[in-house]
Amino acid sequence: MKNLKHLHHLKTRQVTLVFALSFFFLIAGNPVEVKSQNFDGLEALAGFSSQVYFSAGNEERAEAIARRCDKAIKWYSELLNFRPSLTLLILDPEDWGRFTSFPVYGMPHYKDDHTLVVASRDNDFWKSFIPPINQLPAGLAASIRDAYTGEDGNLTMGPFFDLLALHELGHAFHIQSGLNMQRKWIGELFVNLFLHTYIAENEPELLPALTVFPNMVISGDRSSLTYTTLADLEYRYDEIGQRYPQNYGWYQSRWHAAAADIYDAGGRKVFLDFWRALAGQDEDLESDEELAGFLAGKVHQSVADVLLKWDN
């Protein structure tokens, strides 16, 4: 972690990376209109619990993404006694504009509460996240190479973005089940914990792909950030997203890191208690004092600490 602090020498590059990350998460949390429910021109992939459609020539990748989503749905459905519905689209650049109005190819996003759109191939958007390896401390450069080297030997952020399909799946679980998330930041922390718990329990070899980039972001210089508190985020959410997108990316990276700490503190039981606590709390908890007590008593102290120790 000491080496990561040298990233202030890359401030300009980091702002670009955080801007892109923040842009992703803002869209990921807000469904984008898909132009049509008619999937003519796409191939259907049978044998999965979700409806899966993909651009021709991408069956192998479609199967890999659908298999991970299917396994996650099955695993969580058995734990939570709830199964959301999902339609998954895996699209080439040529099909992207036909089935989604979102302008950036490679950005995972929802059409609504049910339809998830992901890219079928590496792309310029993913490549924009690759830092200048030759300018990084040796330890950090090695971590990035280990986590994000593709089969062709080149760096790609695809391993990170592929896992974010499960972040989106977490939103499908809590939205379709009608959980009252209490705060905007809790909704994002919840799905990041959903993602981290699944990977840690089922595919732990992928944890570096999930954690290296967010840790790189939050280890950089904070002096350029306009807002840093959870209260700022809650009451200025739209302003931060529209005027200070790099700030929003920093918040999301903090929640990624917090999800890892929470899992390490209590394992899968914390997520299960989180789900049950939110499912049993229909009324809004107005004060942060109430919320912290609720999280500590019904979920886990590590979750309450995200609120209590955020500014430390």
Image (spheres, rainbow, N blue to C red):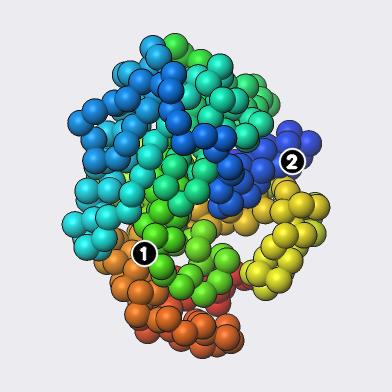
Q: Position of residue 183 (x, y in %)?
A: 56, 71
Q: Are marks 2 and 1 in contact (CB under 8 Å)?
A: no
Q: Give residue 15's mark.
A: 2
Query: What residue is shown at x 46% (from left), y 73% (from top)?
Result: 180
Residue 234 in which image quadrant: bottom right
- Judge whether 227 appears above or below 134 on screen: below
Closer to us: 80 or 32: 32
Q: Would residue 292 appear left or right of 75 to someone viewing this image? A: right
| Quadrant location of the C terminus in the rendered image | bottom right
As drawn, 86 above or below 305: above
Residue occupied by mark 1: 177
Residue 216 appears in the rendering: no
Q: What secondary structure is found at the residue carrying circle 2?
A: helix
Identified by mark 1, the residue type is: Ser
Give the Cα distance between marks 2 and 1: 36 Å
Q: Residues within 10 Å of mark 1 (few under 14, many from 20)?
A: few
For marks 2 and 1, give the one nearer the viewer.
1
Q: Position of residue 2 (x, y in %)?
A: 59, 46
Disc 1 element: helix
- The answer to whether 308 appears left or right of 103 in the picture is left
Residue 101 sits in quarter:
top right
Residue 138 x %, y %: 56, 29
Relative side of 24 to 143, left or right:
right
